């Protein structure tokens, strides 16, 4: 973490410069006020091999598109992994505090509020701070950045989209299949119909609003098996049950 400069006013500023993703600005600081549709429904998946046996420990990711564009596959010919892909760009967090105080910054998964990592947990002097996040922490999807500075709590939303399969499968997955080959993806976790207020790193207000489309691609990966990608359309107000077959190399 790098301290950039001293900041002398009585305001608190939080900024996120996203090089591999979009920043989502929220109309309110506490994004818990955002309504999440379809909280009672999920994609229930079962992963099997070519002999019908369950496959455990399969990493589950997804690829999505916004209502402003078509669903397009990320880089990779026939879903093959690139052997020499460049390191993905980093996500930079910048924040300032007006006075010395205890600061904690955490990254949570959207909807489930699963803790991904704690970025800062320390007493800091007043000033502006900036640091980078390892992009392999974040798979595709929505996230919350939670800032706790003394008695004030601010939460910001962010959506992350990787640009290659190598980047995607190296990140922390949404979930993994269990011993029976089963996994669950709640619709709320996938972010359908949650308003996304997209800003640029140079503007404080939203420049557009988008929504994640219900047609997505499920991406499954486990070493020793071929990368698996399947497009599915997620229905409203009803569960979706899918079986996925992985082929061994």
Image (cartoon, rainbow, N blue to C red):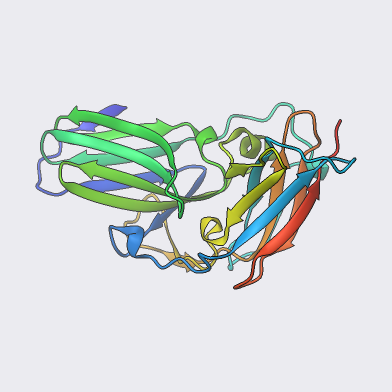
The quadrant of the rendering that contains the C terminus is top right
User: Foreground: 31 or 66?
Assistant: 31
241 left or right, relative to 22: right
225 left or right, relative to 143: right
Q: Residue furthest bottom?
A: 237
Q: Quadrant of residue 215?
A: bottom right
User: Foreground: 118 or 93?
Assistant: 118
Residue shown at the point (86%, 44%) measured from the top left: 52
Q: Position of residue 38 (x, y in %)?
A: 53, 68
Q: Quadrant of residue 31?
A: bottom left
Q: Position of residue 158 (x, y in %)?
A: 44, 51
Q: Position of residue 79 (x, y in %)?
A: 78, 42
User: Foreground: 191 or 246?
Assistant: 246
Residue shown at the point (36%, 34%) measured from the top left: 118
The quadrant of the rendering that contains the N terminus is top left
Asked if residue 70 can be seen in this view, the reply is: no
Q: Residue furthest front?
A: 180
Asked if residue 87 can be seen in this view, the reply is: yes
123 left or right, relative to 121: left
Q: Is residue 127 above or below residue 23?
A: above
Image mark count: 0
Residue shown at the point (81%, 36%) measured from the top left: 226
226 left or right, relative to 3: right
Q: Position of residue 196 (x, y in %)?
A: 46, 62
């Amino acid at each position: 973490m790098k301290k950039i400069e001293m900041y002398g006013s009585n305001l608190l500023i939080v900024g996120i410069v996203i090089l591999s993703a979009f920043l989502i600005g929220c109309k309110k600081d506490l994004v818990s006020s955002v309504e999440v549709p379809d909280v009672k429904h999920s994609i229930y998946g079962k992963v099997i091999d070519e002999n019908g046996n369950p496959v455990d420990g399969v990493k589950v990711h997804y690829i999505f598109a916004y209502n402003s564009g078509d669903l397009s596959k990320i880089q990779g010919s026939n879903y093959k992994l690139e052997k020499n892909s460049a390191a993905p760009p980093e996500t930079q967090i910048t924040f300032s505090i007006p006075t010395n105080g205890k600061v904690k910054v955490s990254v949570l998964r959207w909807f489930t509020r699963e803790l991904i990592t704690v970025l800062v947990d320390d007493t800091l002097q007043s000033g502006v701070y900036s640091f980078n996040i390892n992009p392999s922490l974040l798979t595709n999807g929505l996230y919350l950045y939670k800032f706790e500075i003394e008695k004030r709590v601010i939460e910001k939303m962010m959506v992350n989209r990787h640009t290659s399969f190598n980047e995607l499968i190296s990140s922390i997955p949404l979930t993994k299949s269990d011993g029976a080959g089963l996994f669950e993806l709640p619709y709320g976790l996938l972010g359908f119909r949650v308003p996304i207020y997209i800003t640029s790193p140079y503007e404080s207000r939203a420049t557009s609003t988008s929504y994640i489309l219900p047609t997505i691609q499920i991406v499954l990966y486990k070493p020793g098996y071929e990368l698996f990608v399947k497009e599915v359309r997620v229905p409203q107000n009803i569960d979706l049950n899918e079986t996925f077959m992985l082929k061994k190399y």
